[in-house]
Amino acid sequence: MDKKNALRAGAVATGTTLMMLLLSSPALAVVRDDGDDPGPGLSVAETLGLFVVLPIALFVVIAGLVMVLDKSRKQV
């Protein structure tokens, strides 16, 4: 009985996702608004640095600070 319920839930989730994708309208990002003044685009390296390397570096720095500044030392 659990297998039947899981299959039904999967079918409902898949159907709902597909219907939302098919019925959603585009973001209209191509249409320019009045006063819109976009800047120059980013290169591939700038994009990867901004959206991949920078968040990973921030995570490492924050995790390192938490580990170094942790006051609860294990007592042996």
Image: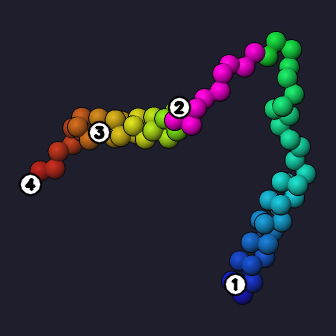
Q: Is residue 47 above or below residue 15?
A: above
Q: Residue at x 86, y 20 (%)?
A: 33
Residue at numbered disc 4: 76
Quadrant where the image shows the C terminus? bottom left
Residue 1: say if magenta. no
Q: Amino acid at mark 3?
A: Gly
What residue would you read off at disc 2? 46
Q: Which numbered disc flags the more N-terminal residue, 1 or 2? A: 1
Residue that carries the numbered disc 1 in the rendered image: 3
Point out the frontmost of discs 4 and 2.
2
The picture places residue 7, in percent across and down from the top left corner, at 74, 78
- The residue beneath circle 3 is 64
Say which quarter of the image contains residue 15: bottom right
How packed mark 1 is, by other alpha carbons closer than 10 Å (few <14, some 14-19, many 20 or more), is few
SS type, badge 2: helix
Which residue appears farthest toward the bottom when viewing the image?
A: 1
Q: Earlier in the sequence, mark 2 or mark 3?
A: 2
**Mark 3 touching mark 4, by CB under 8 A?**
no
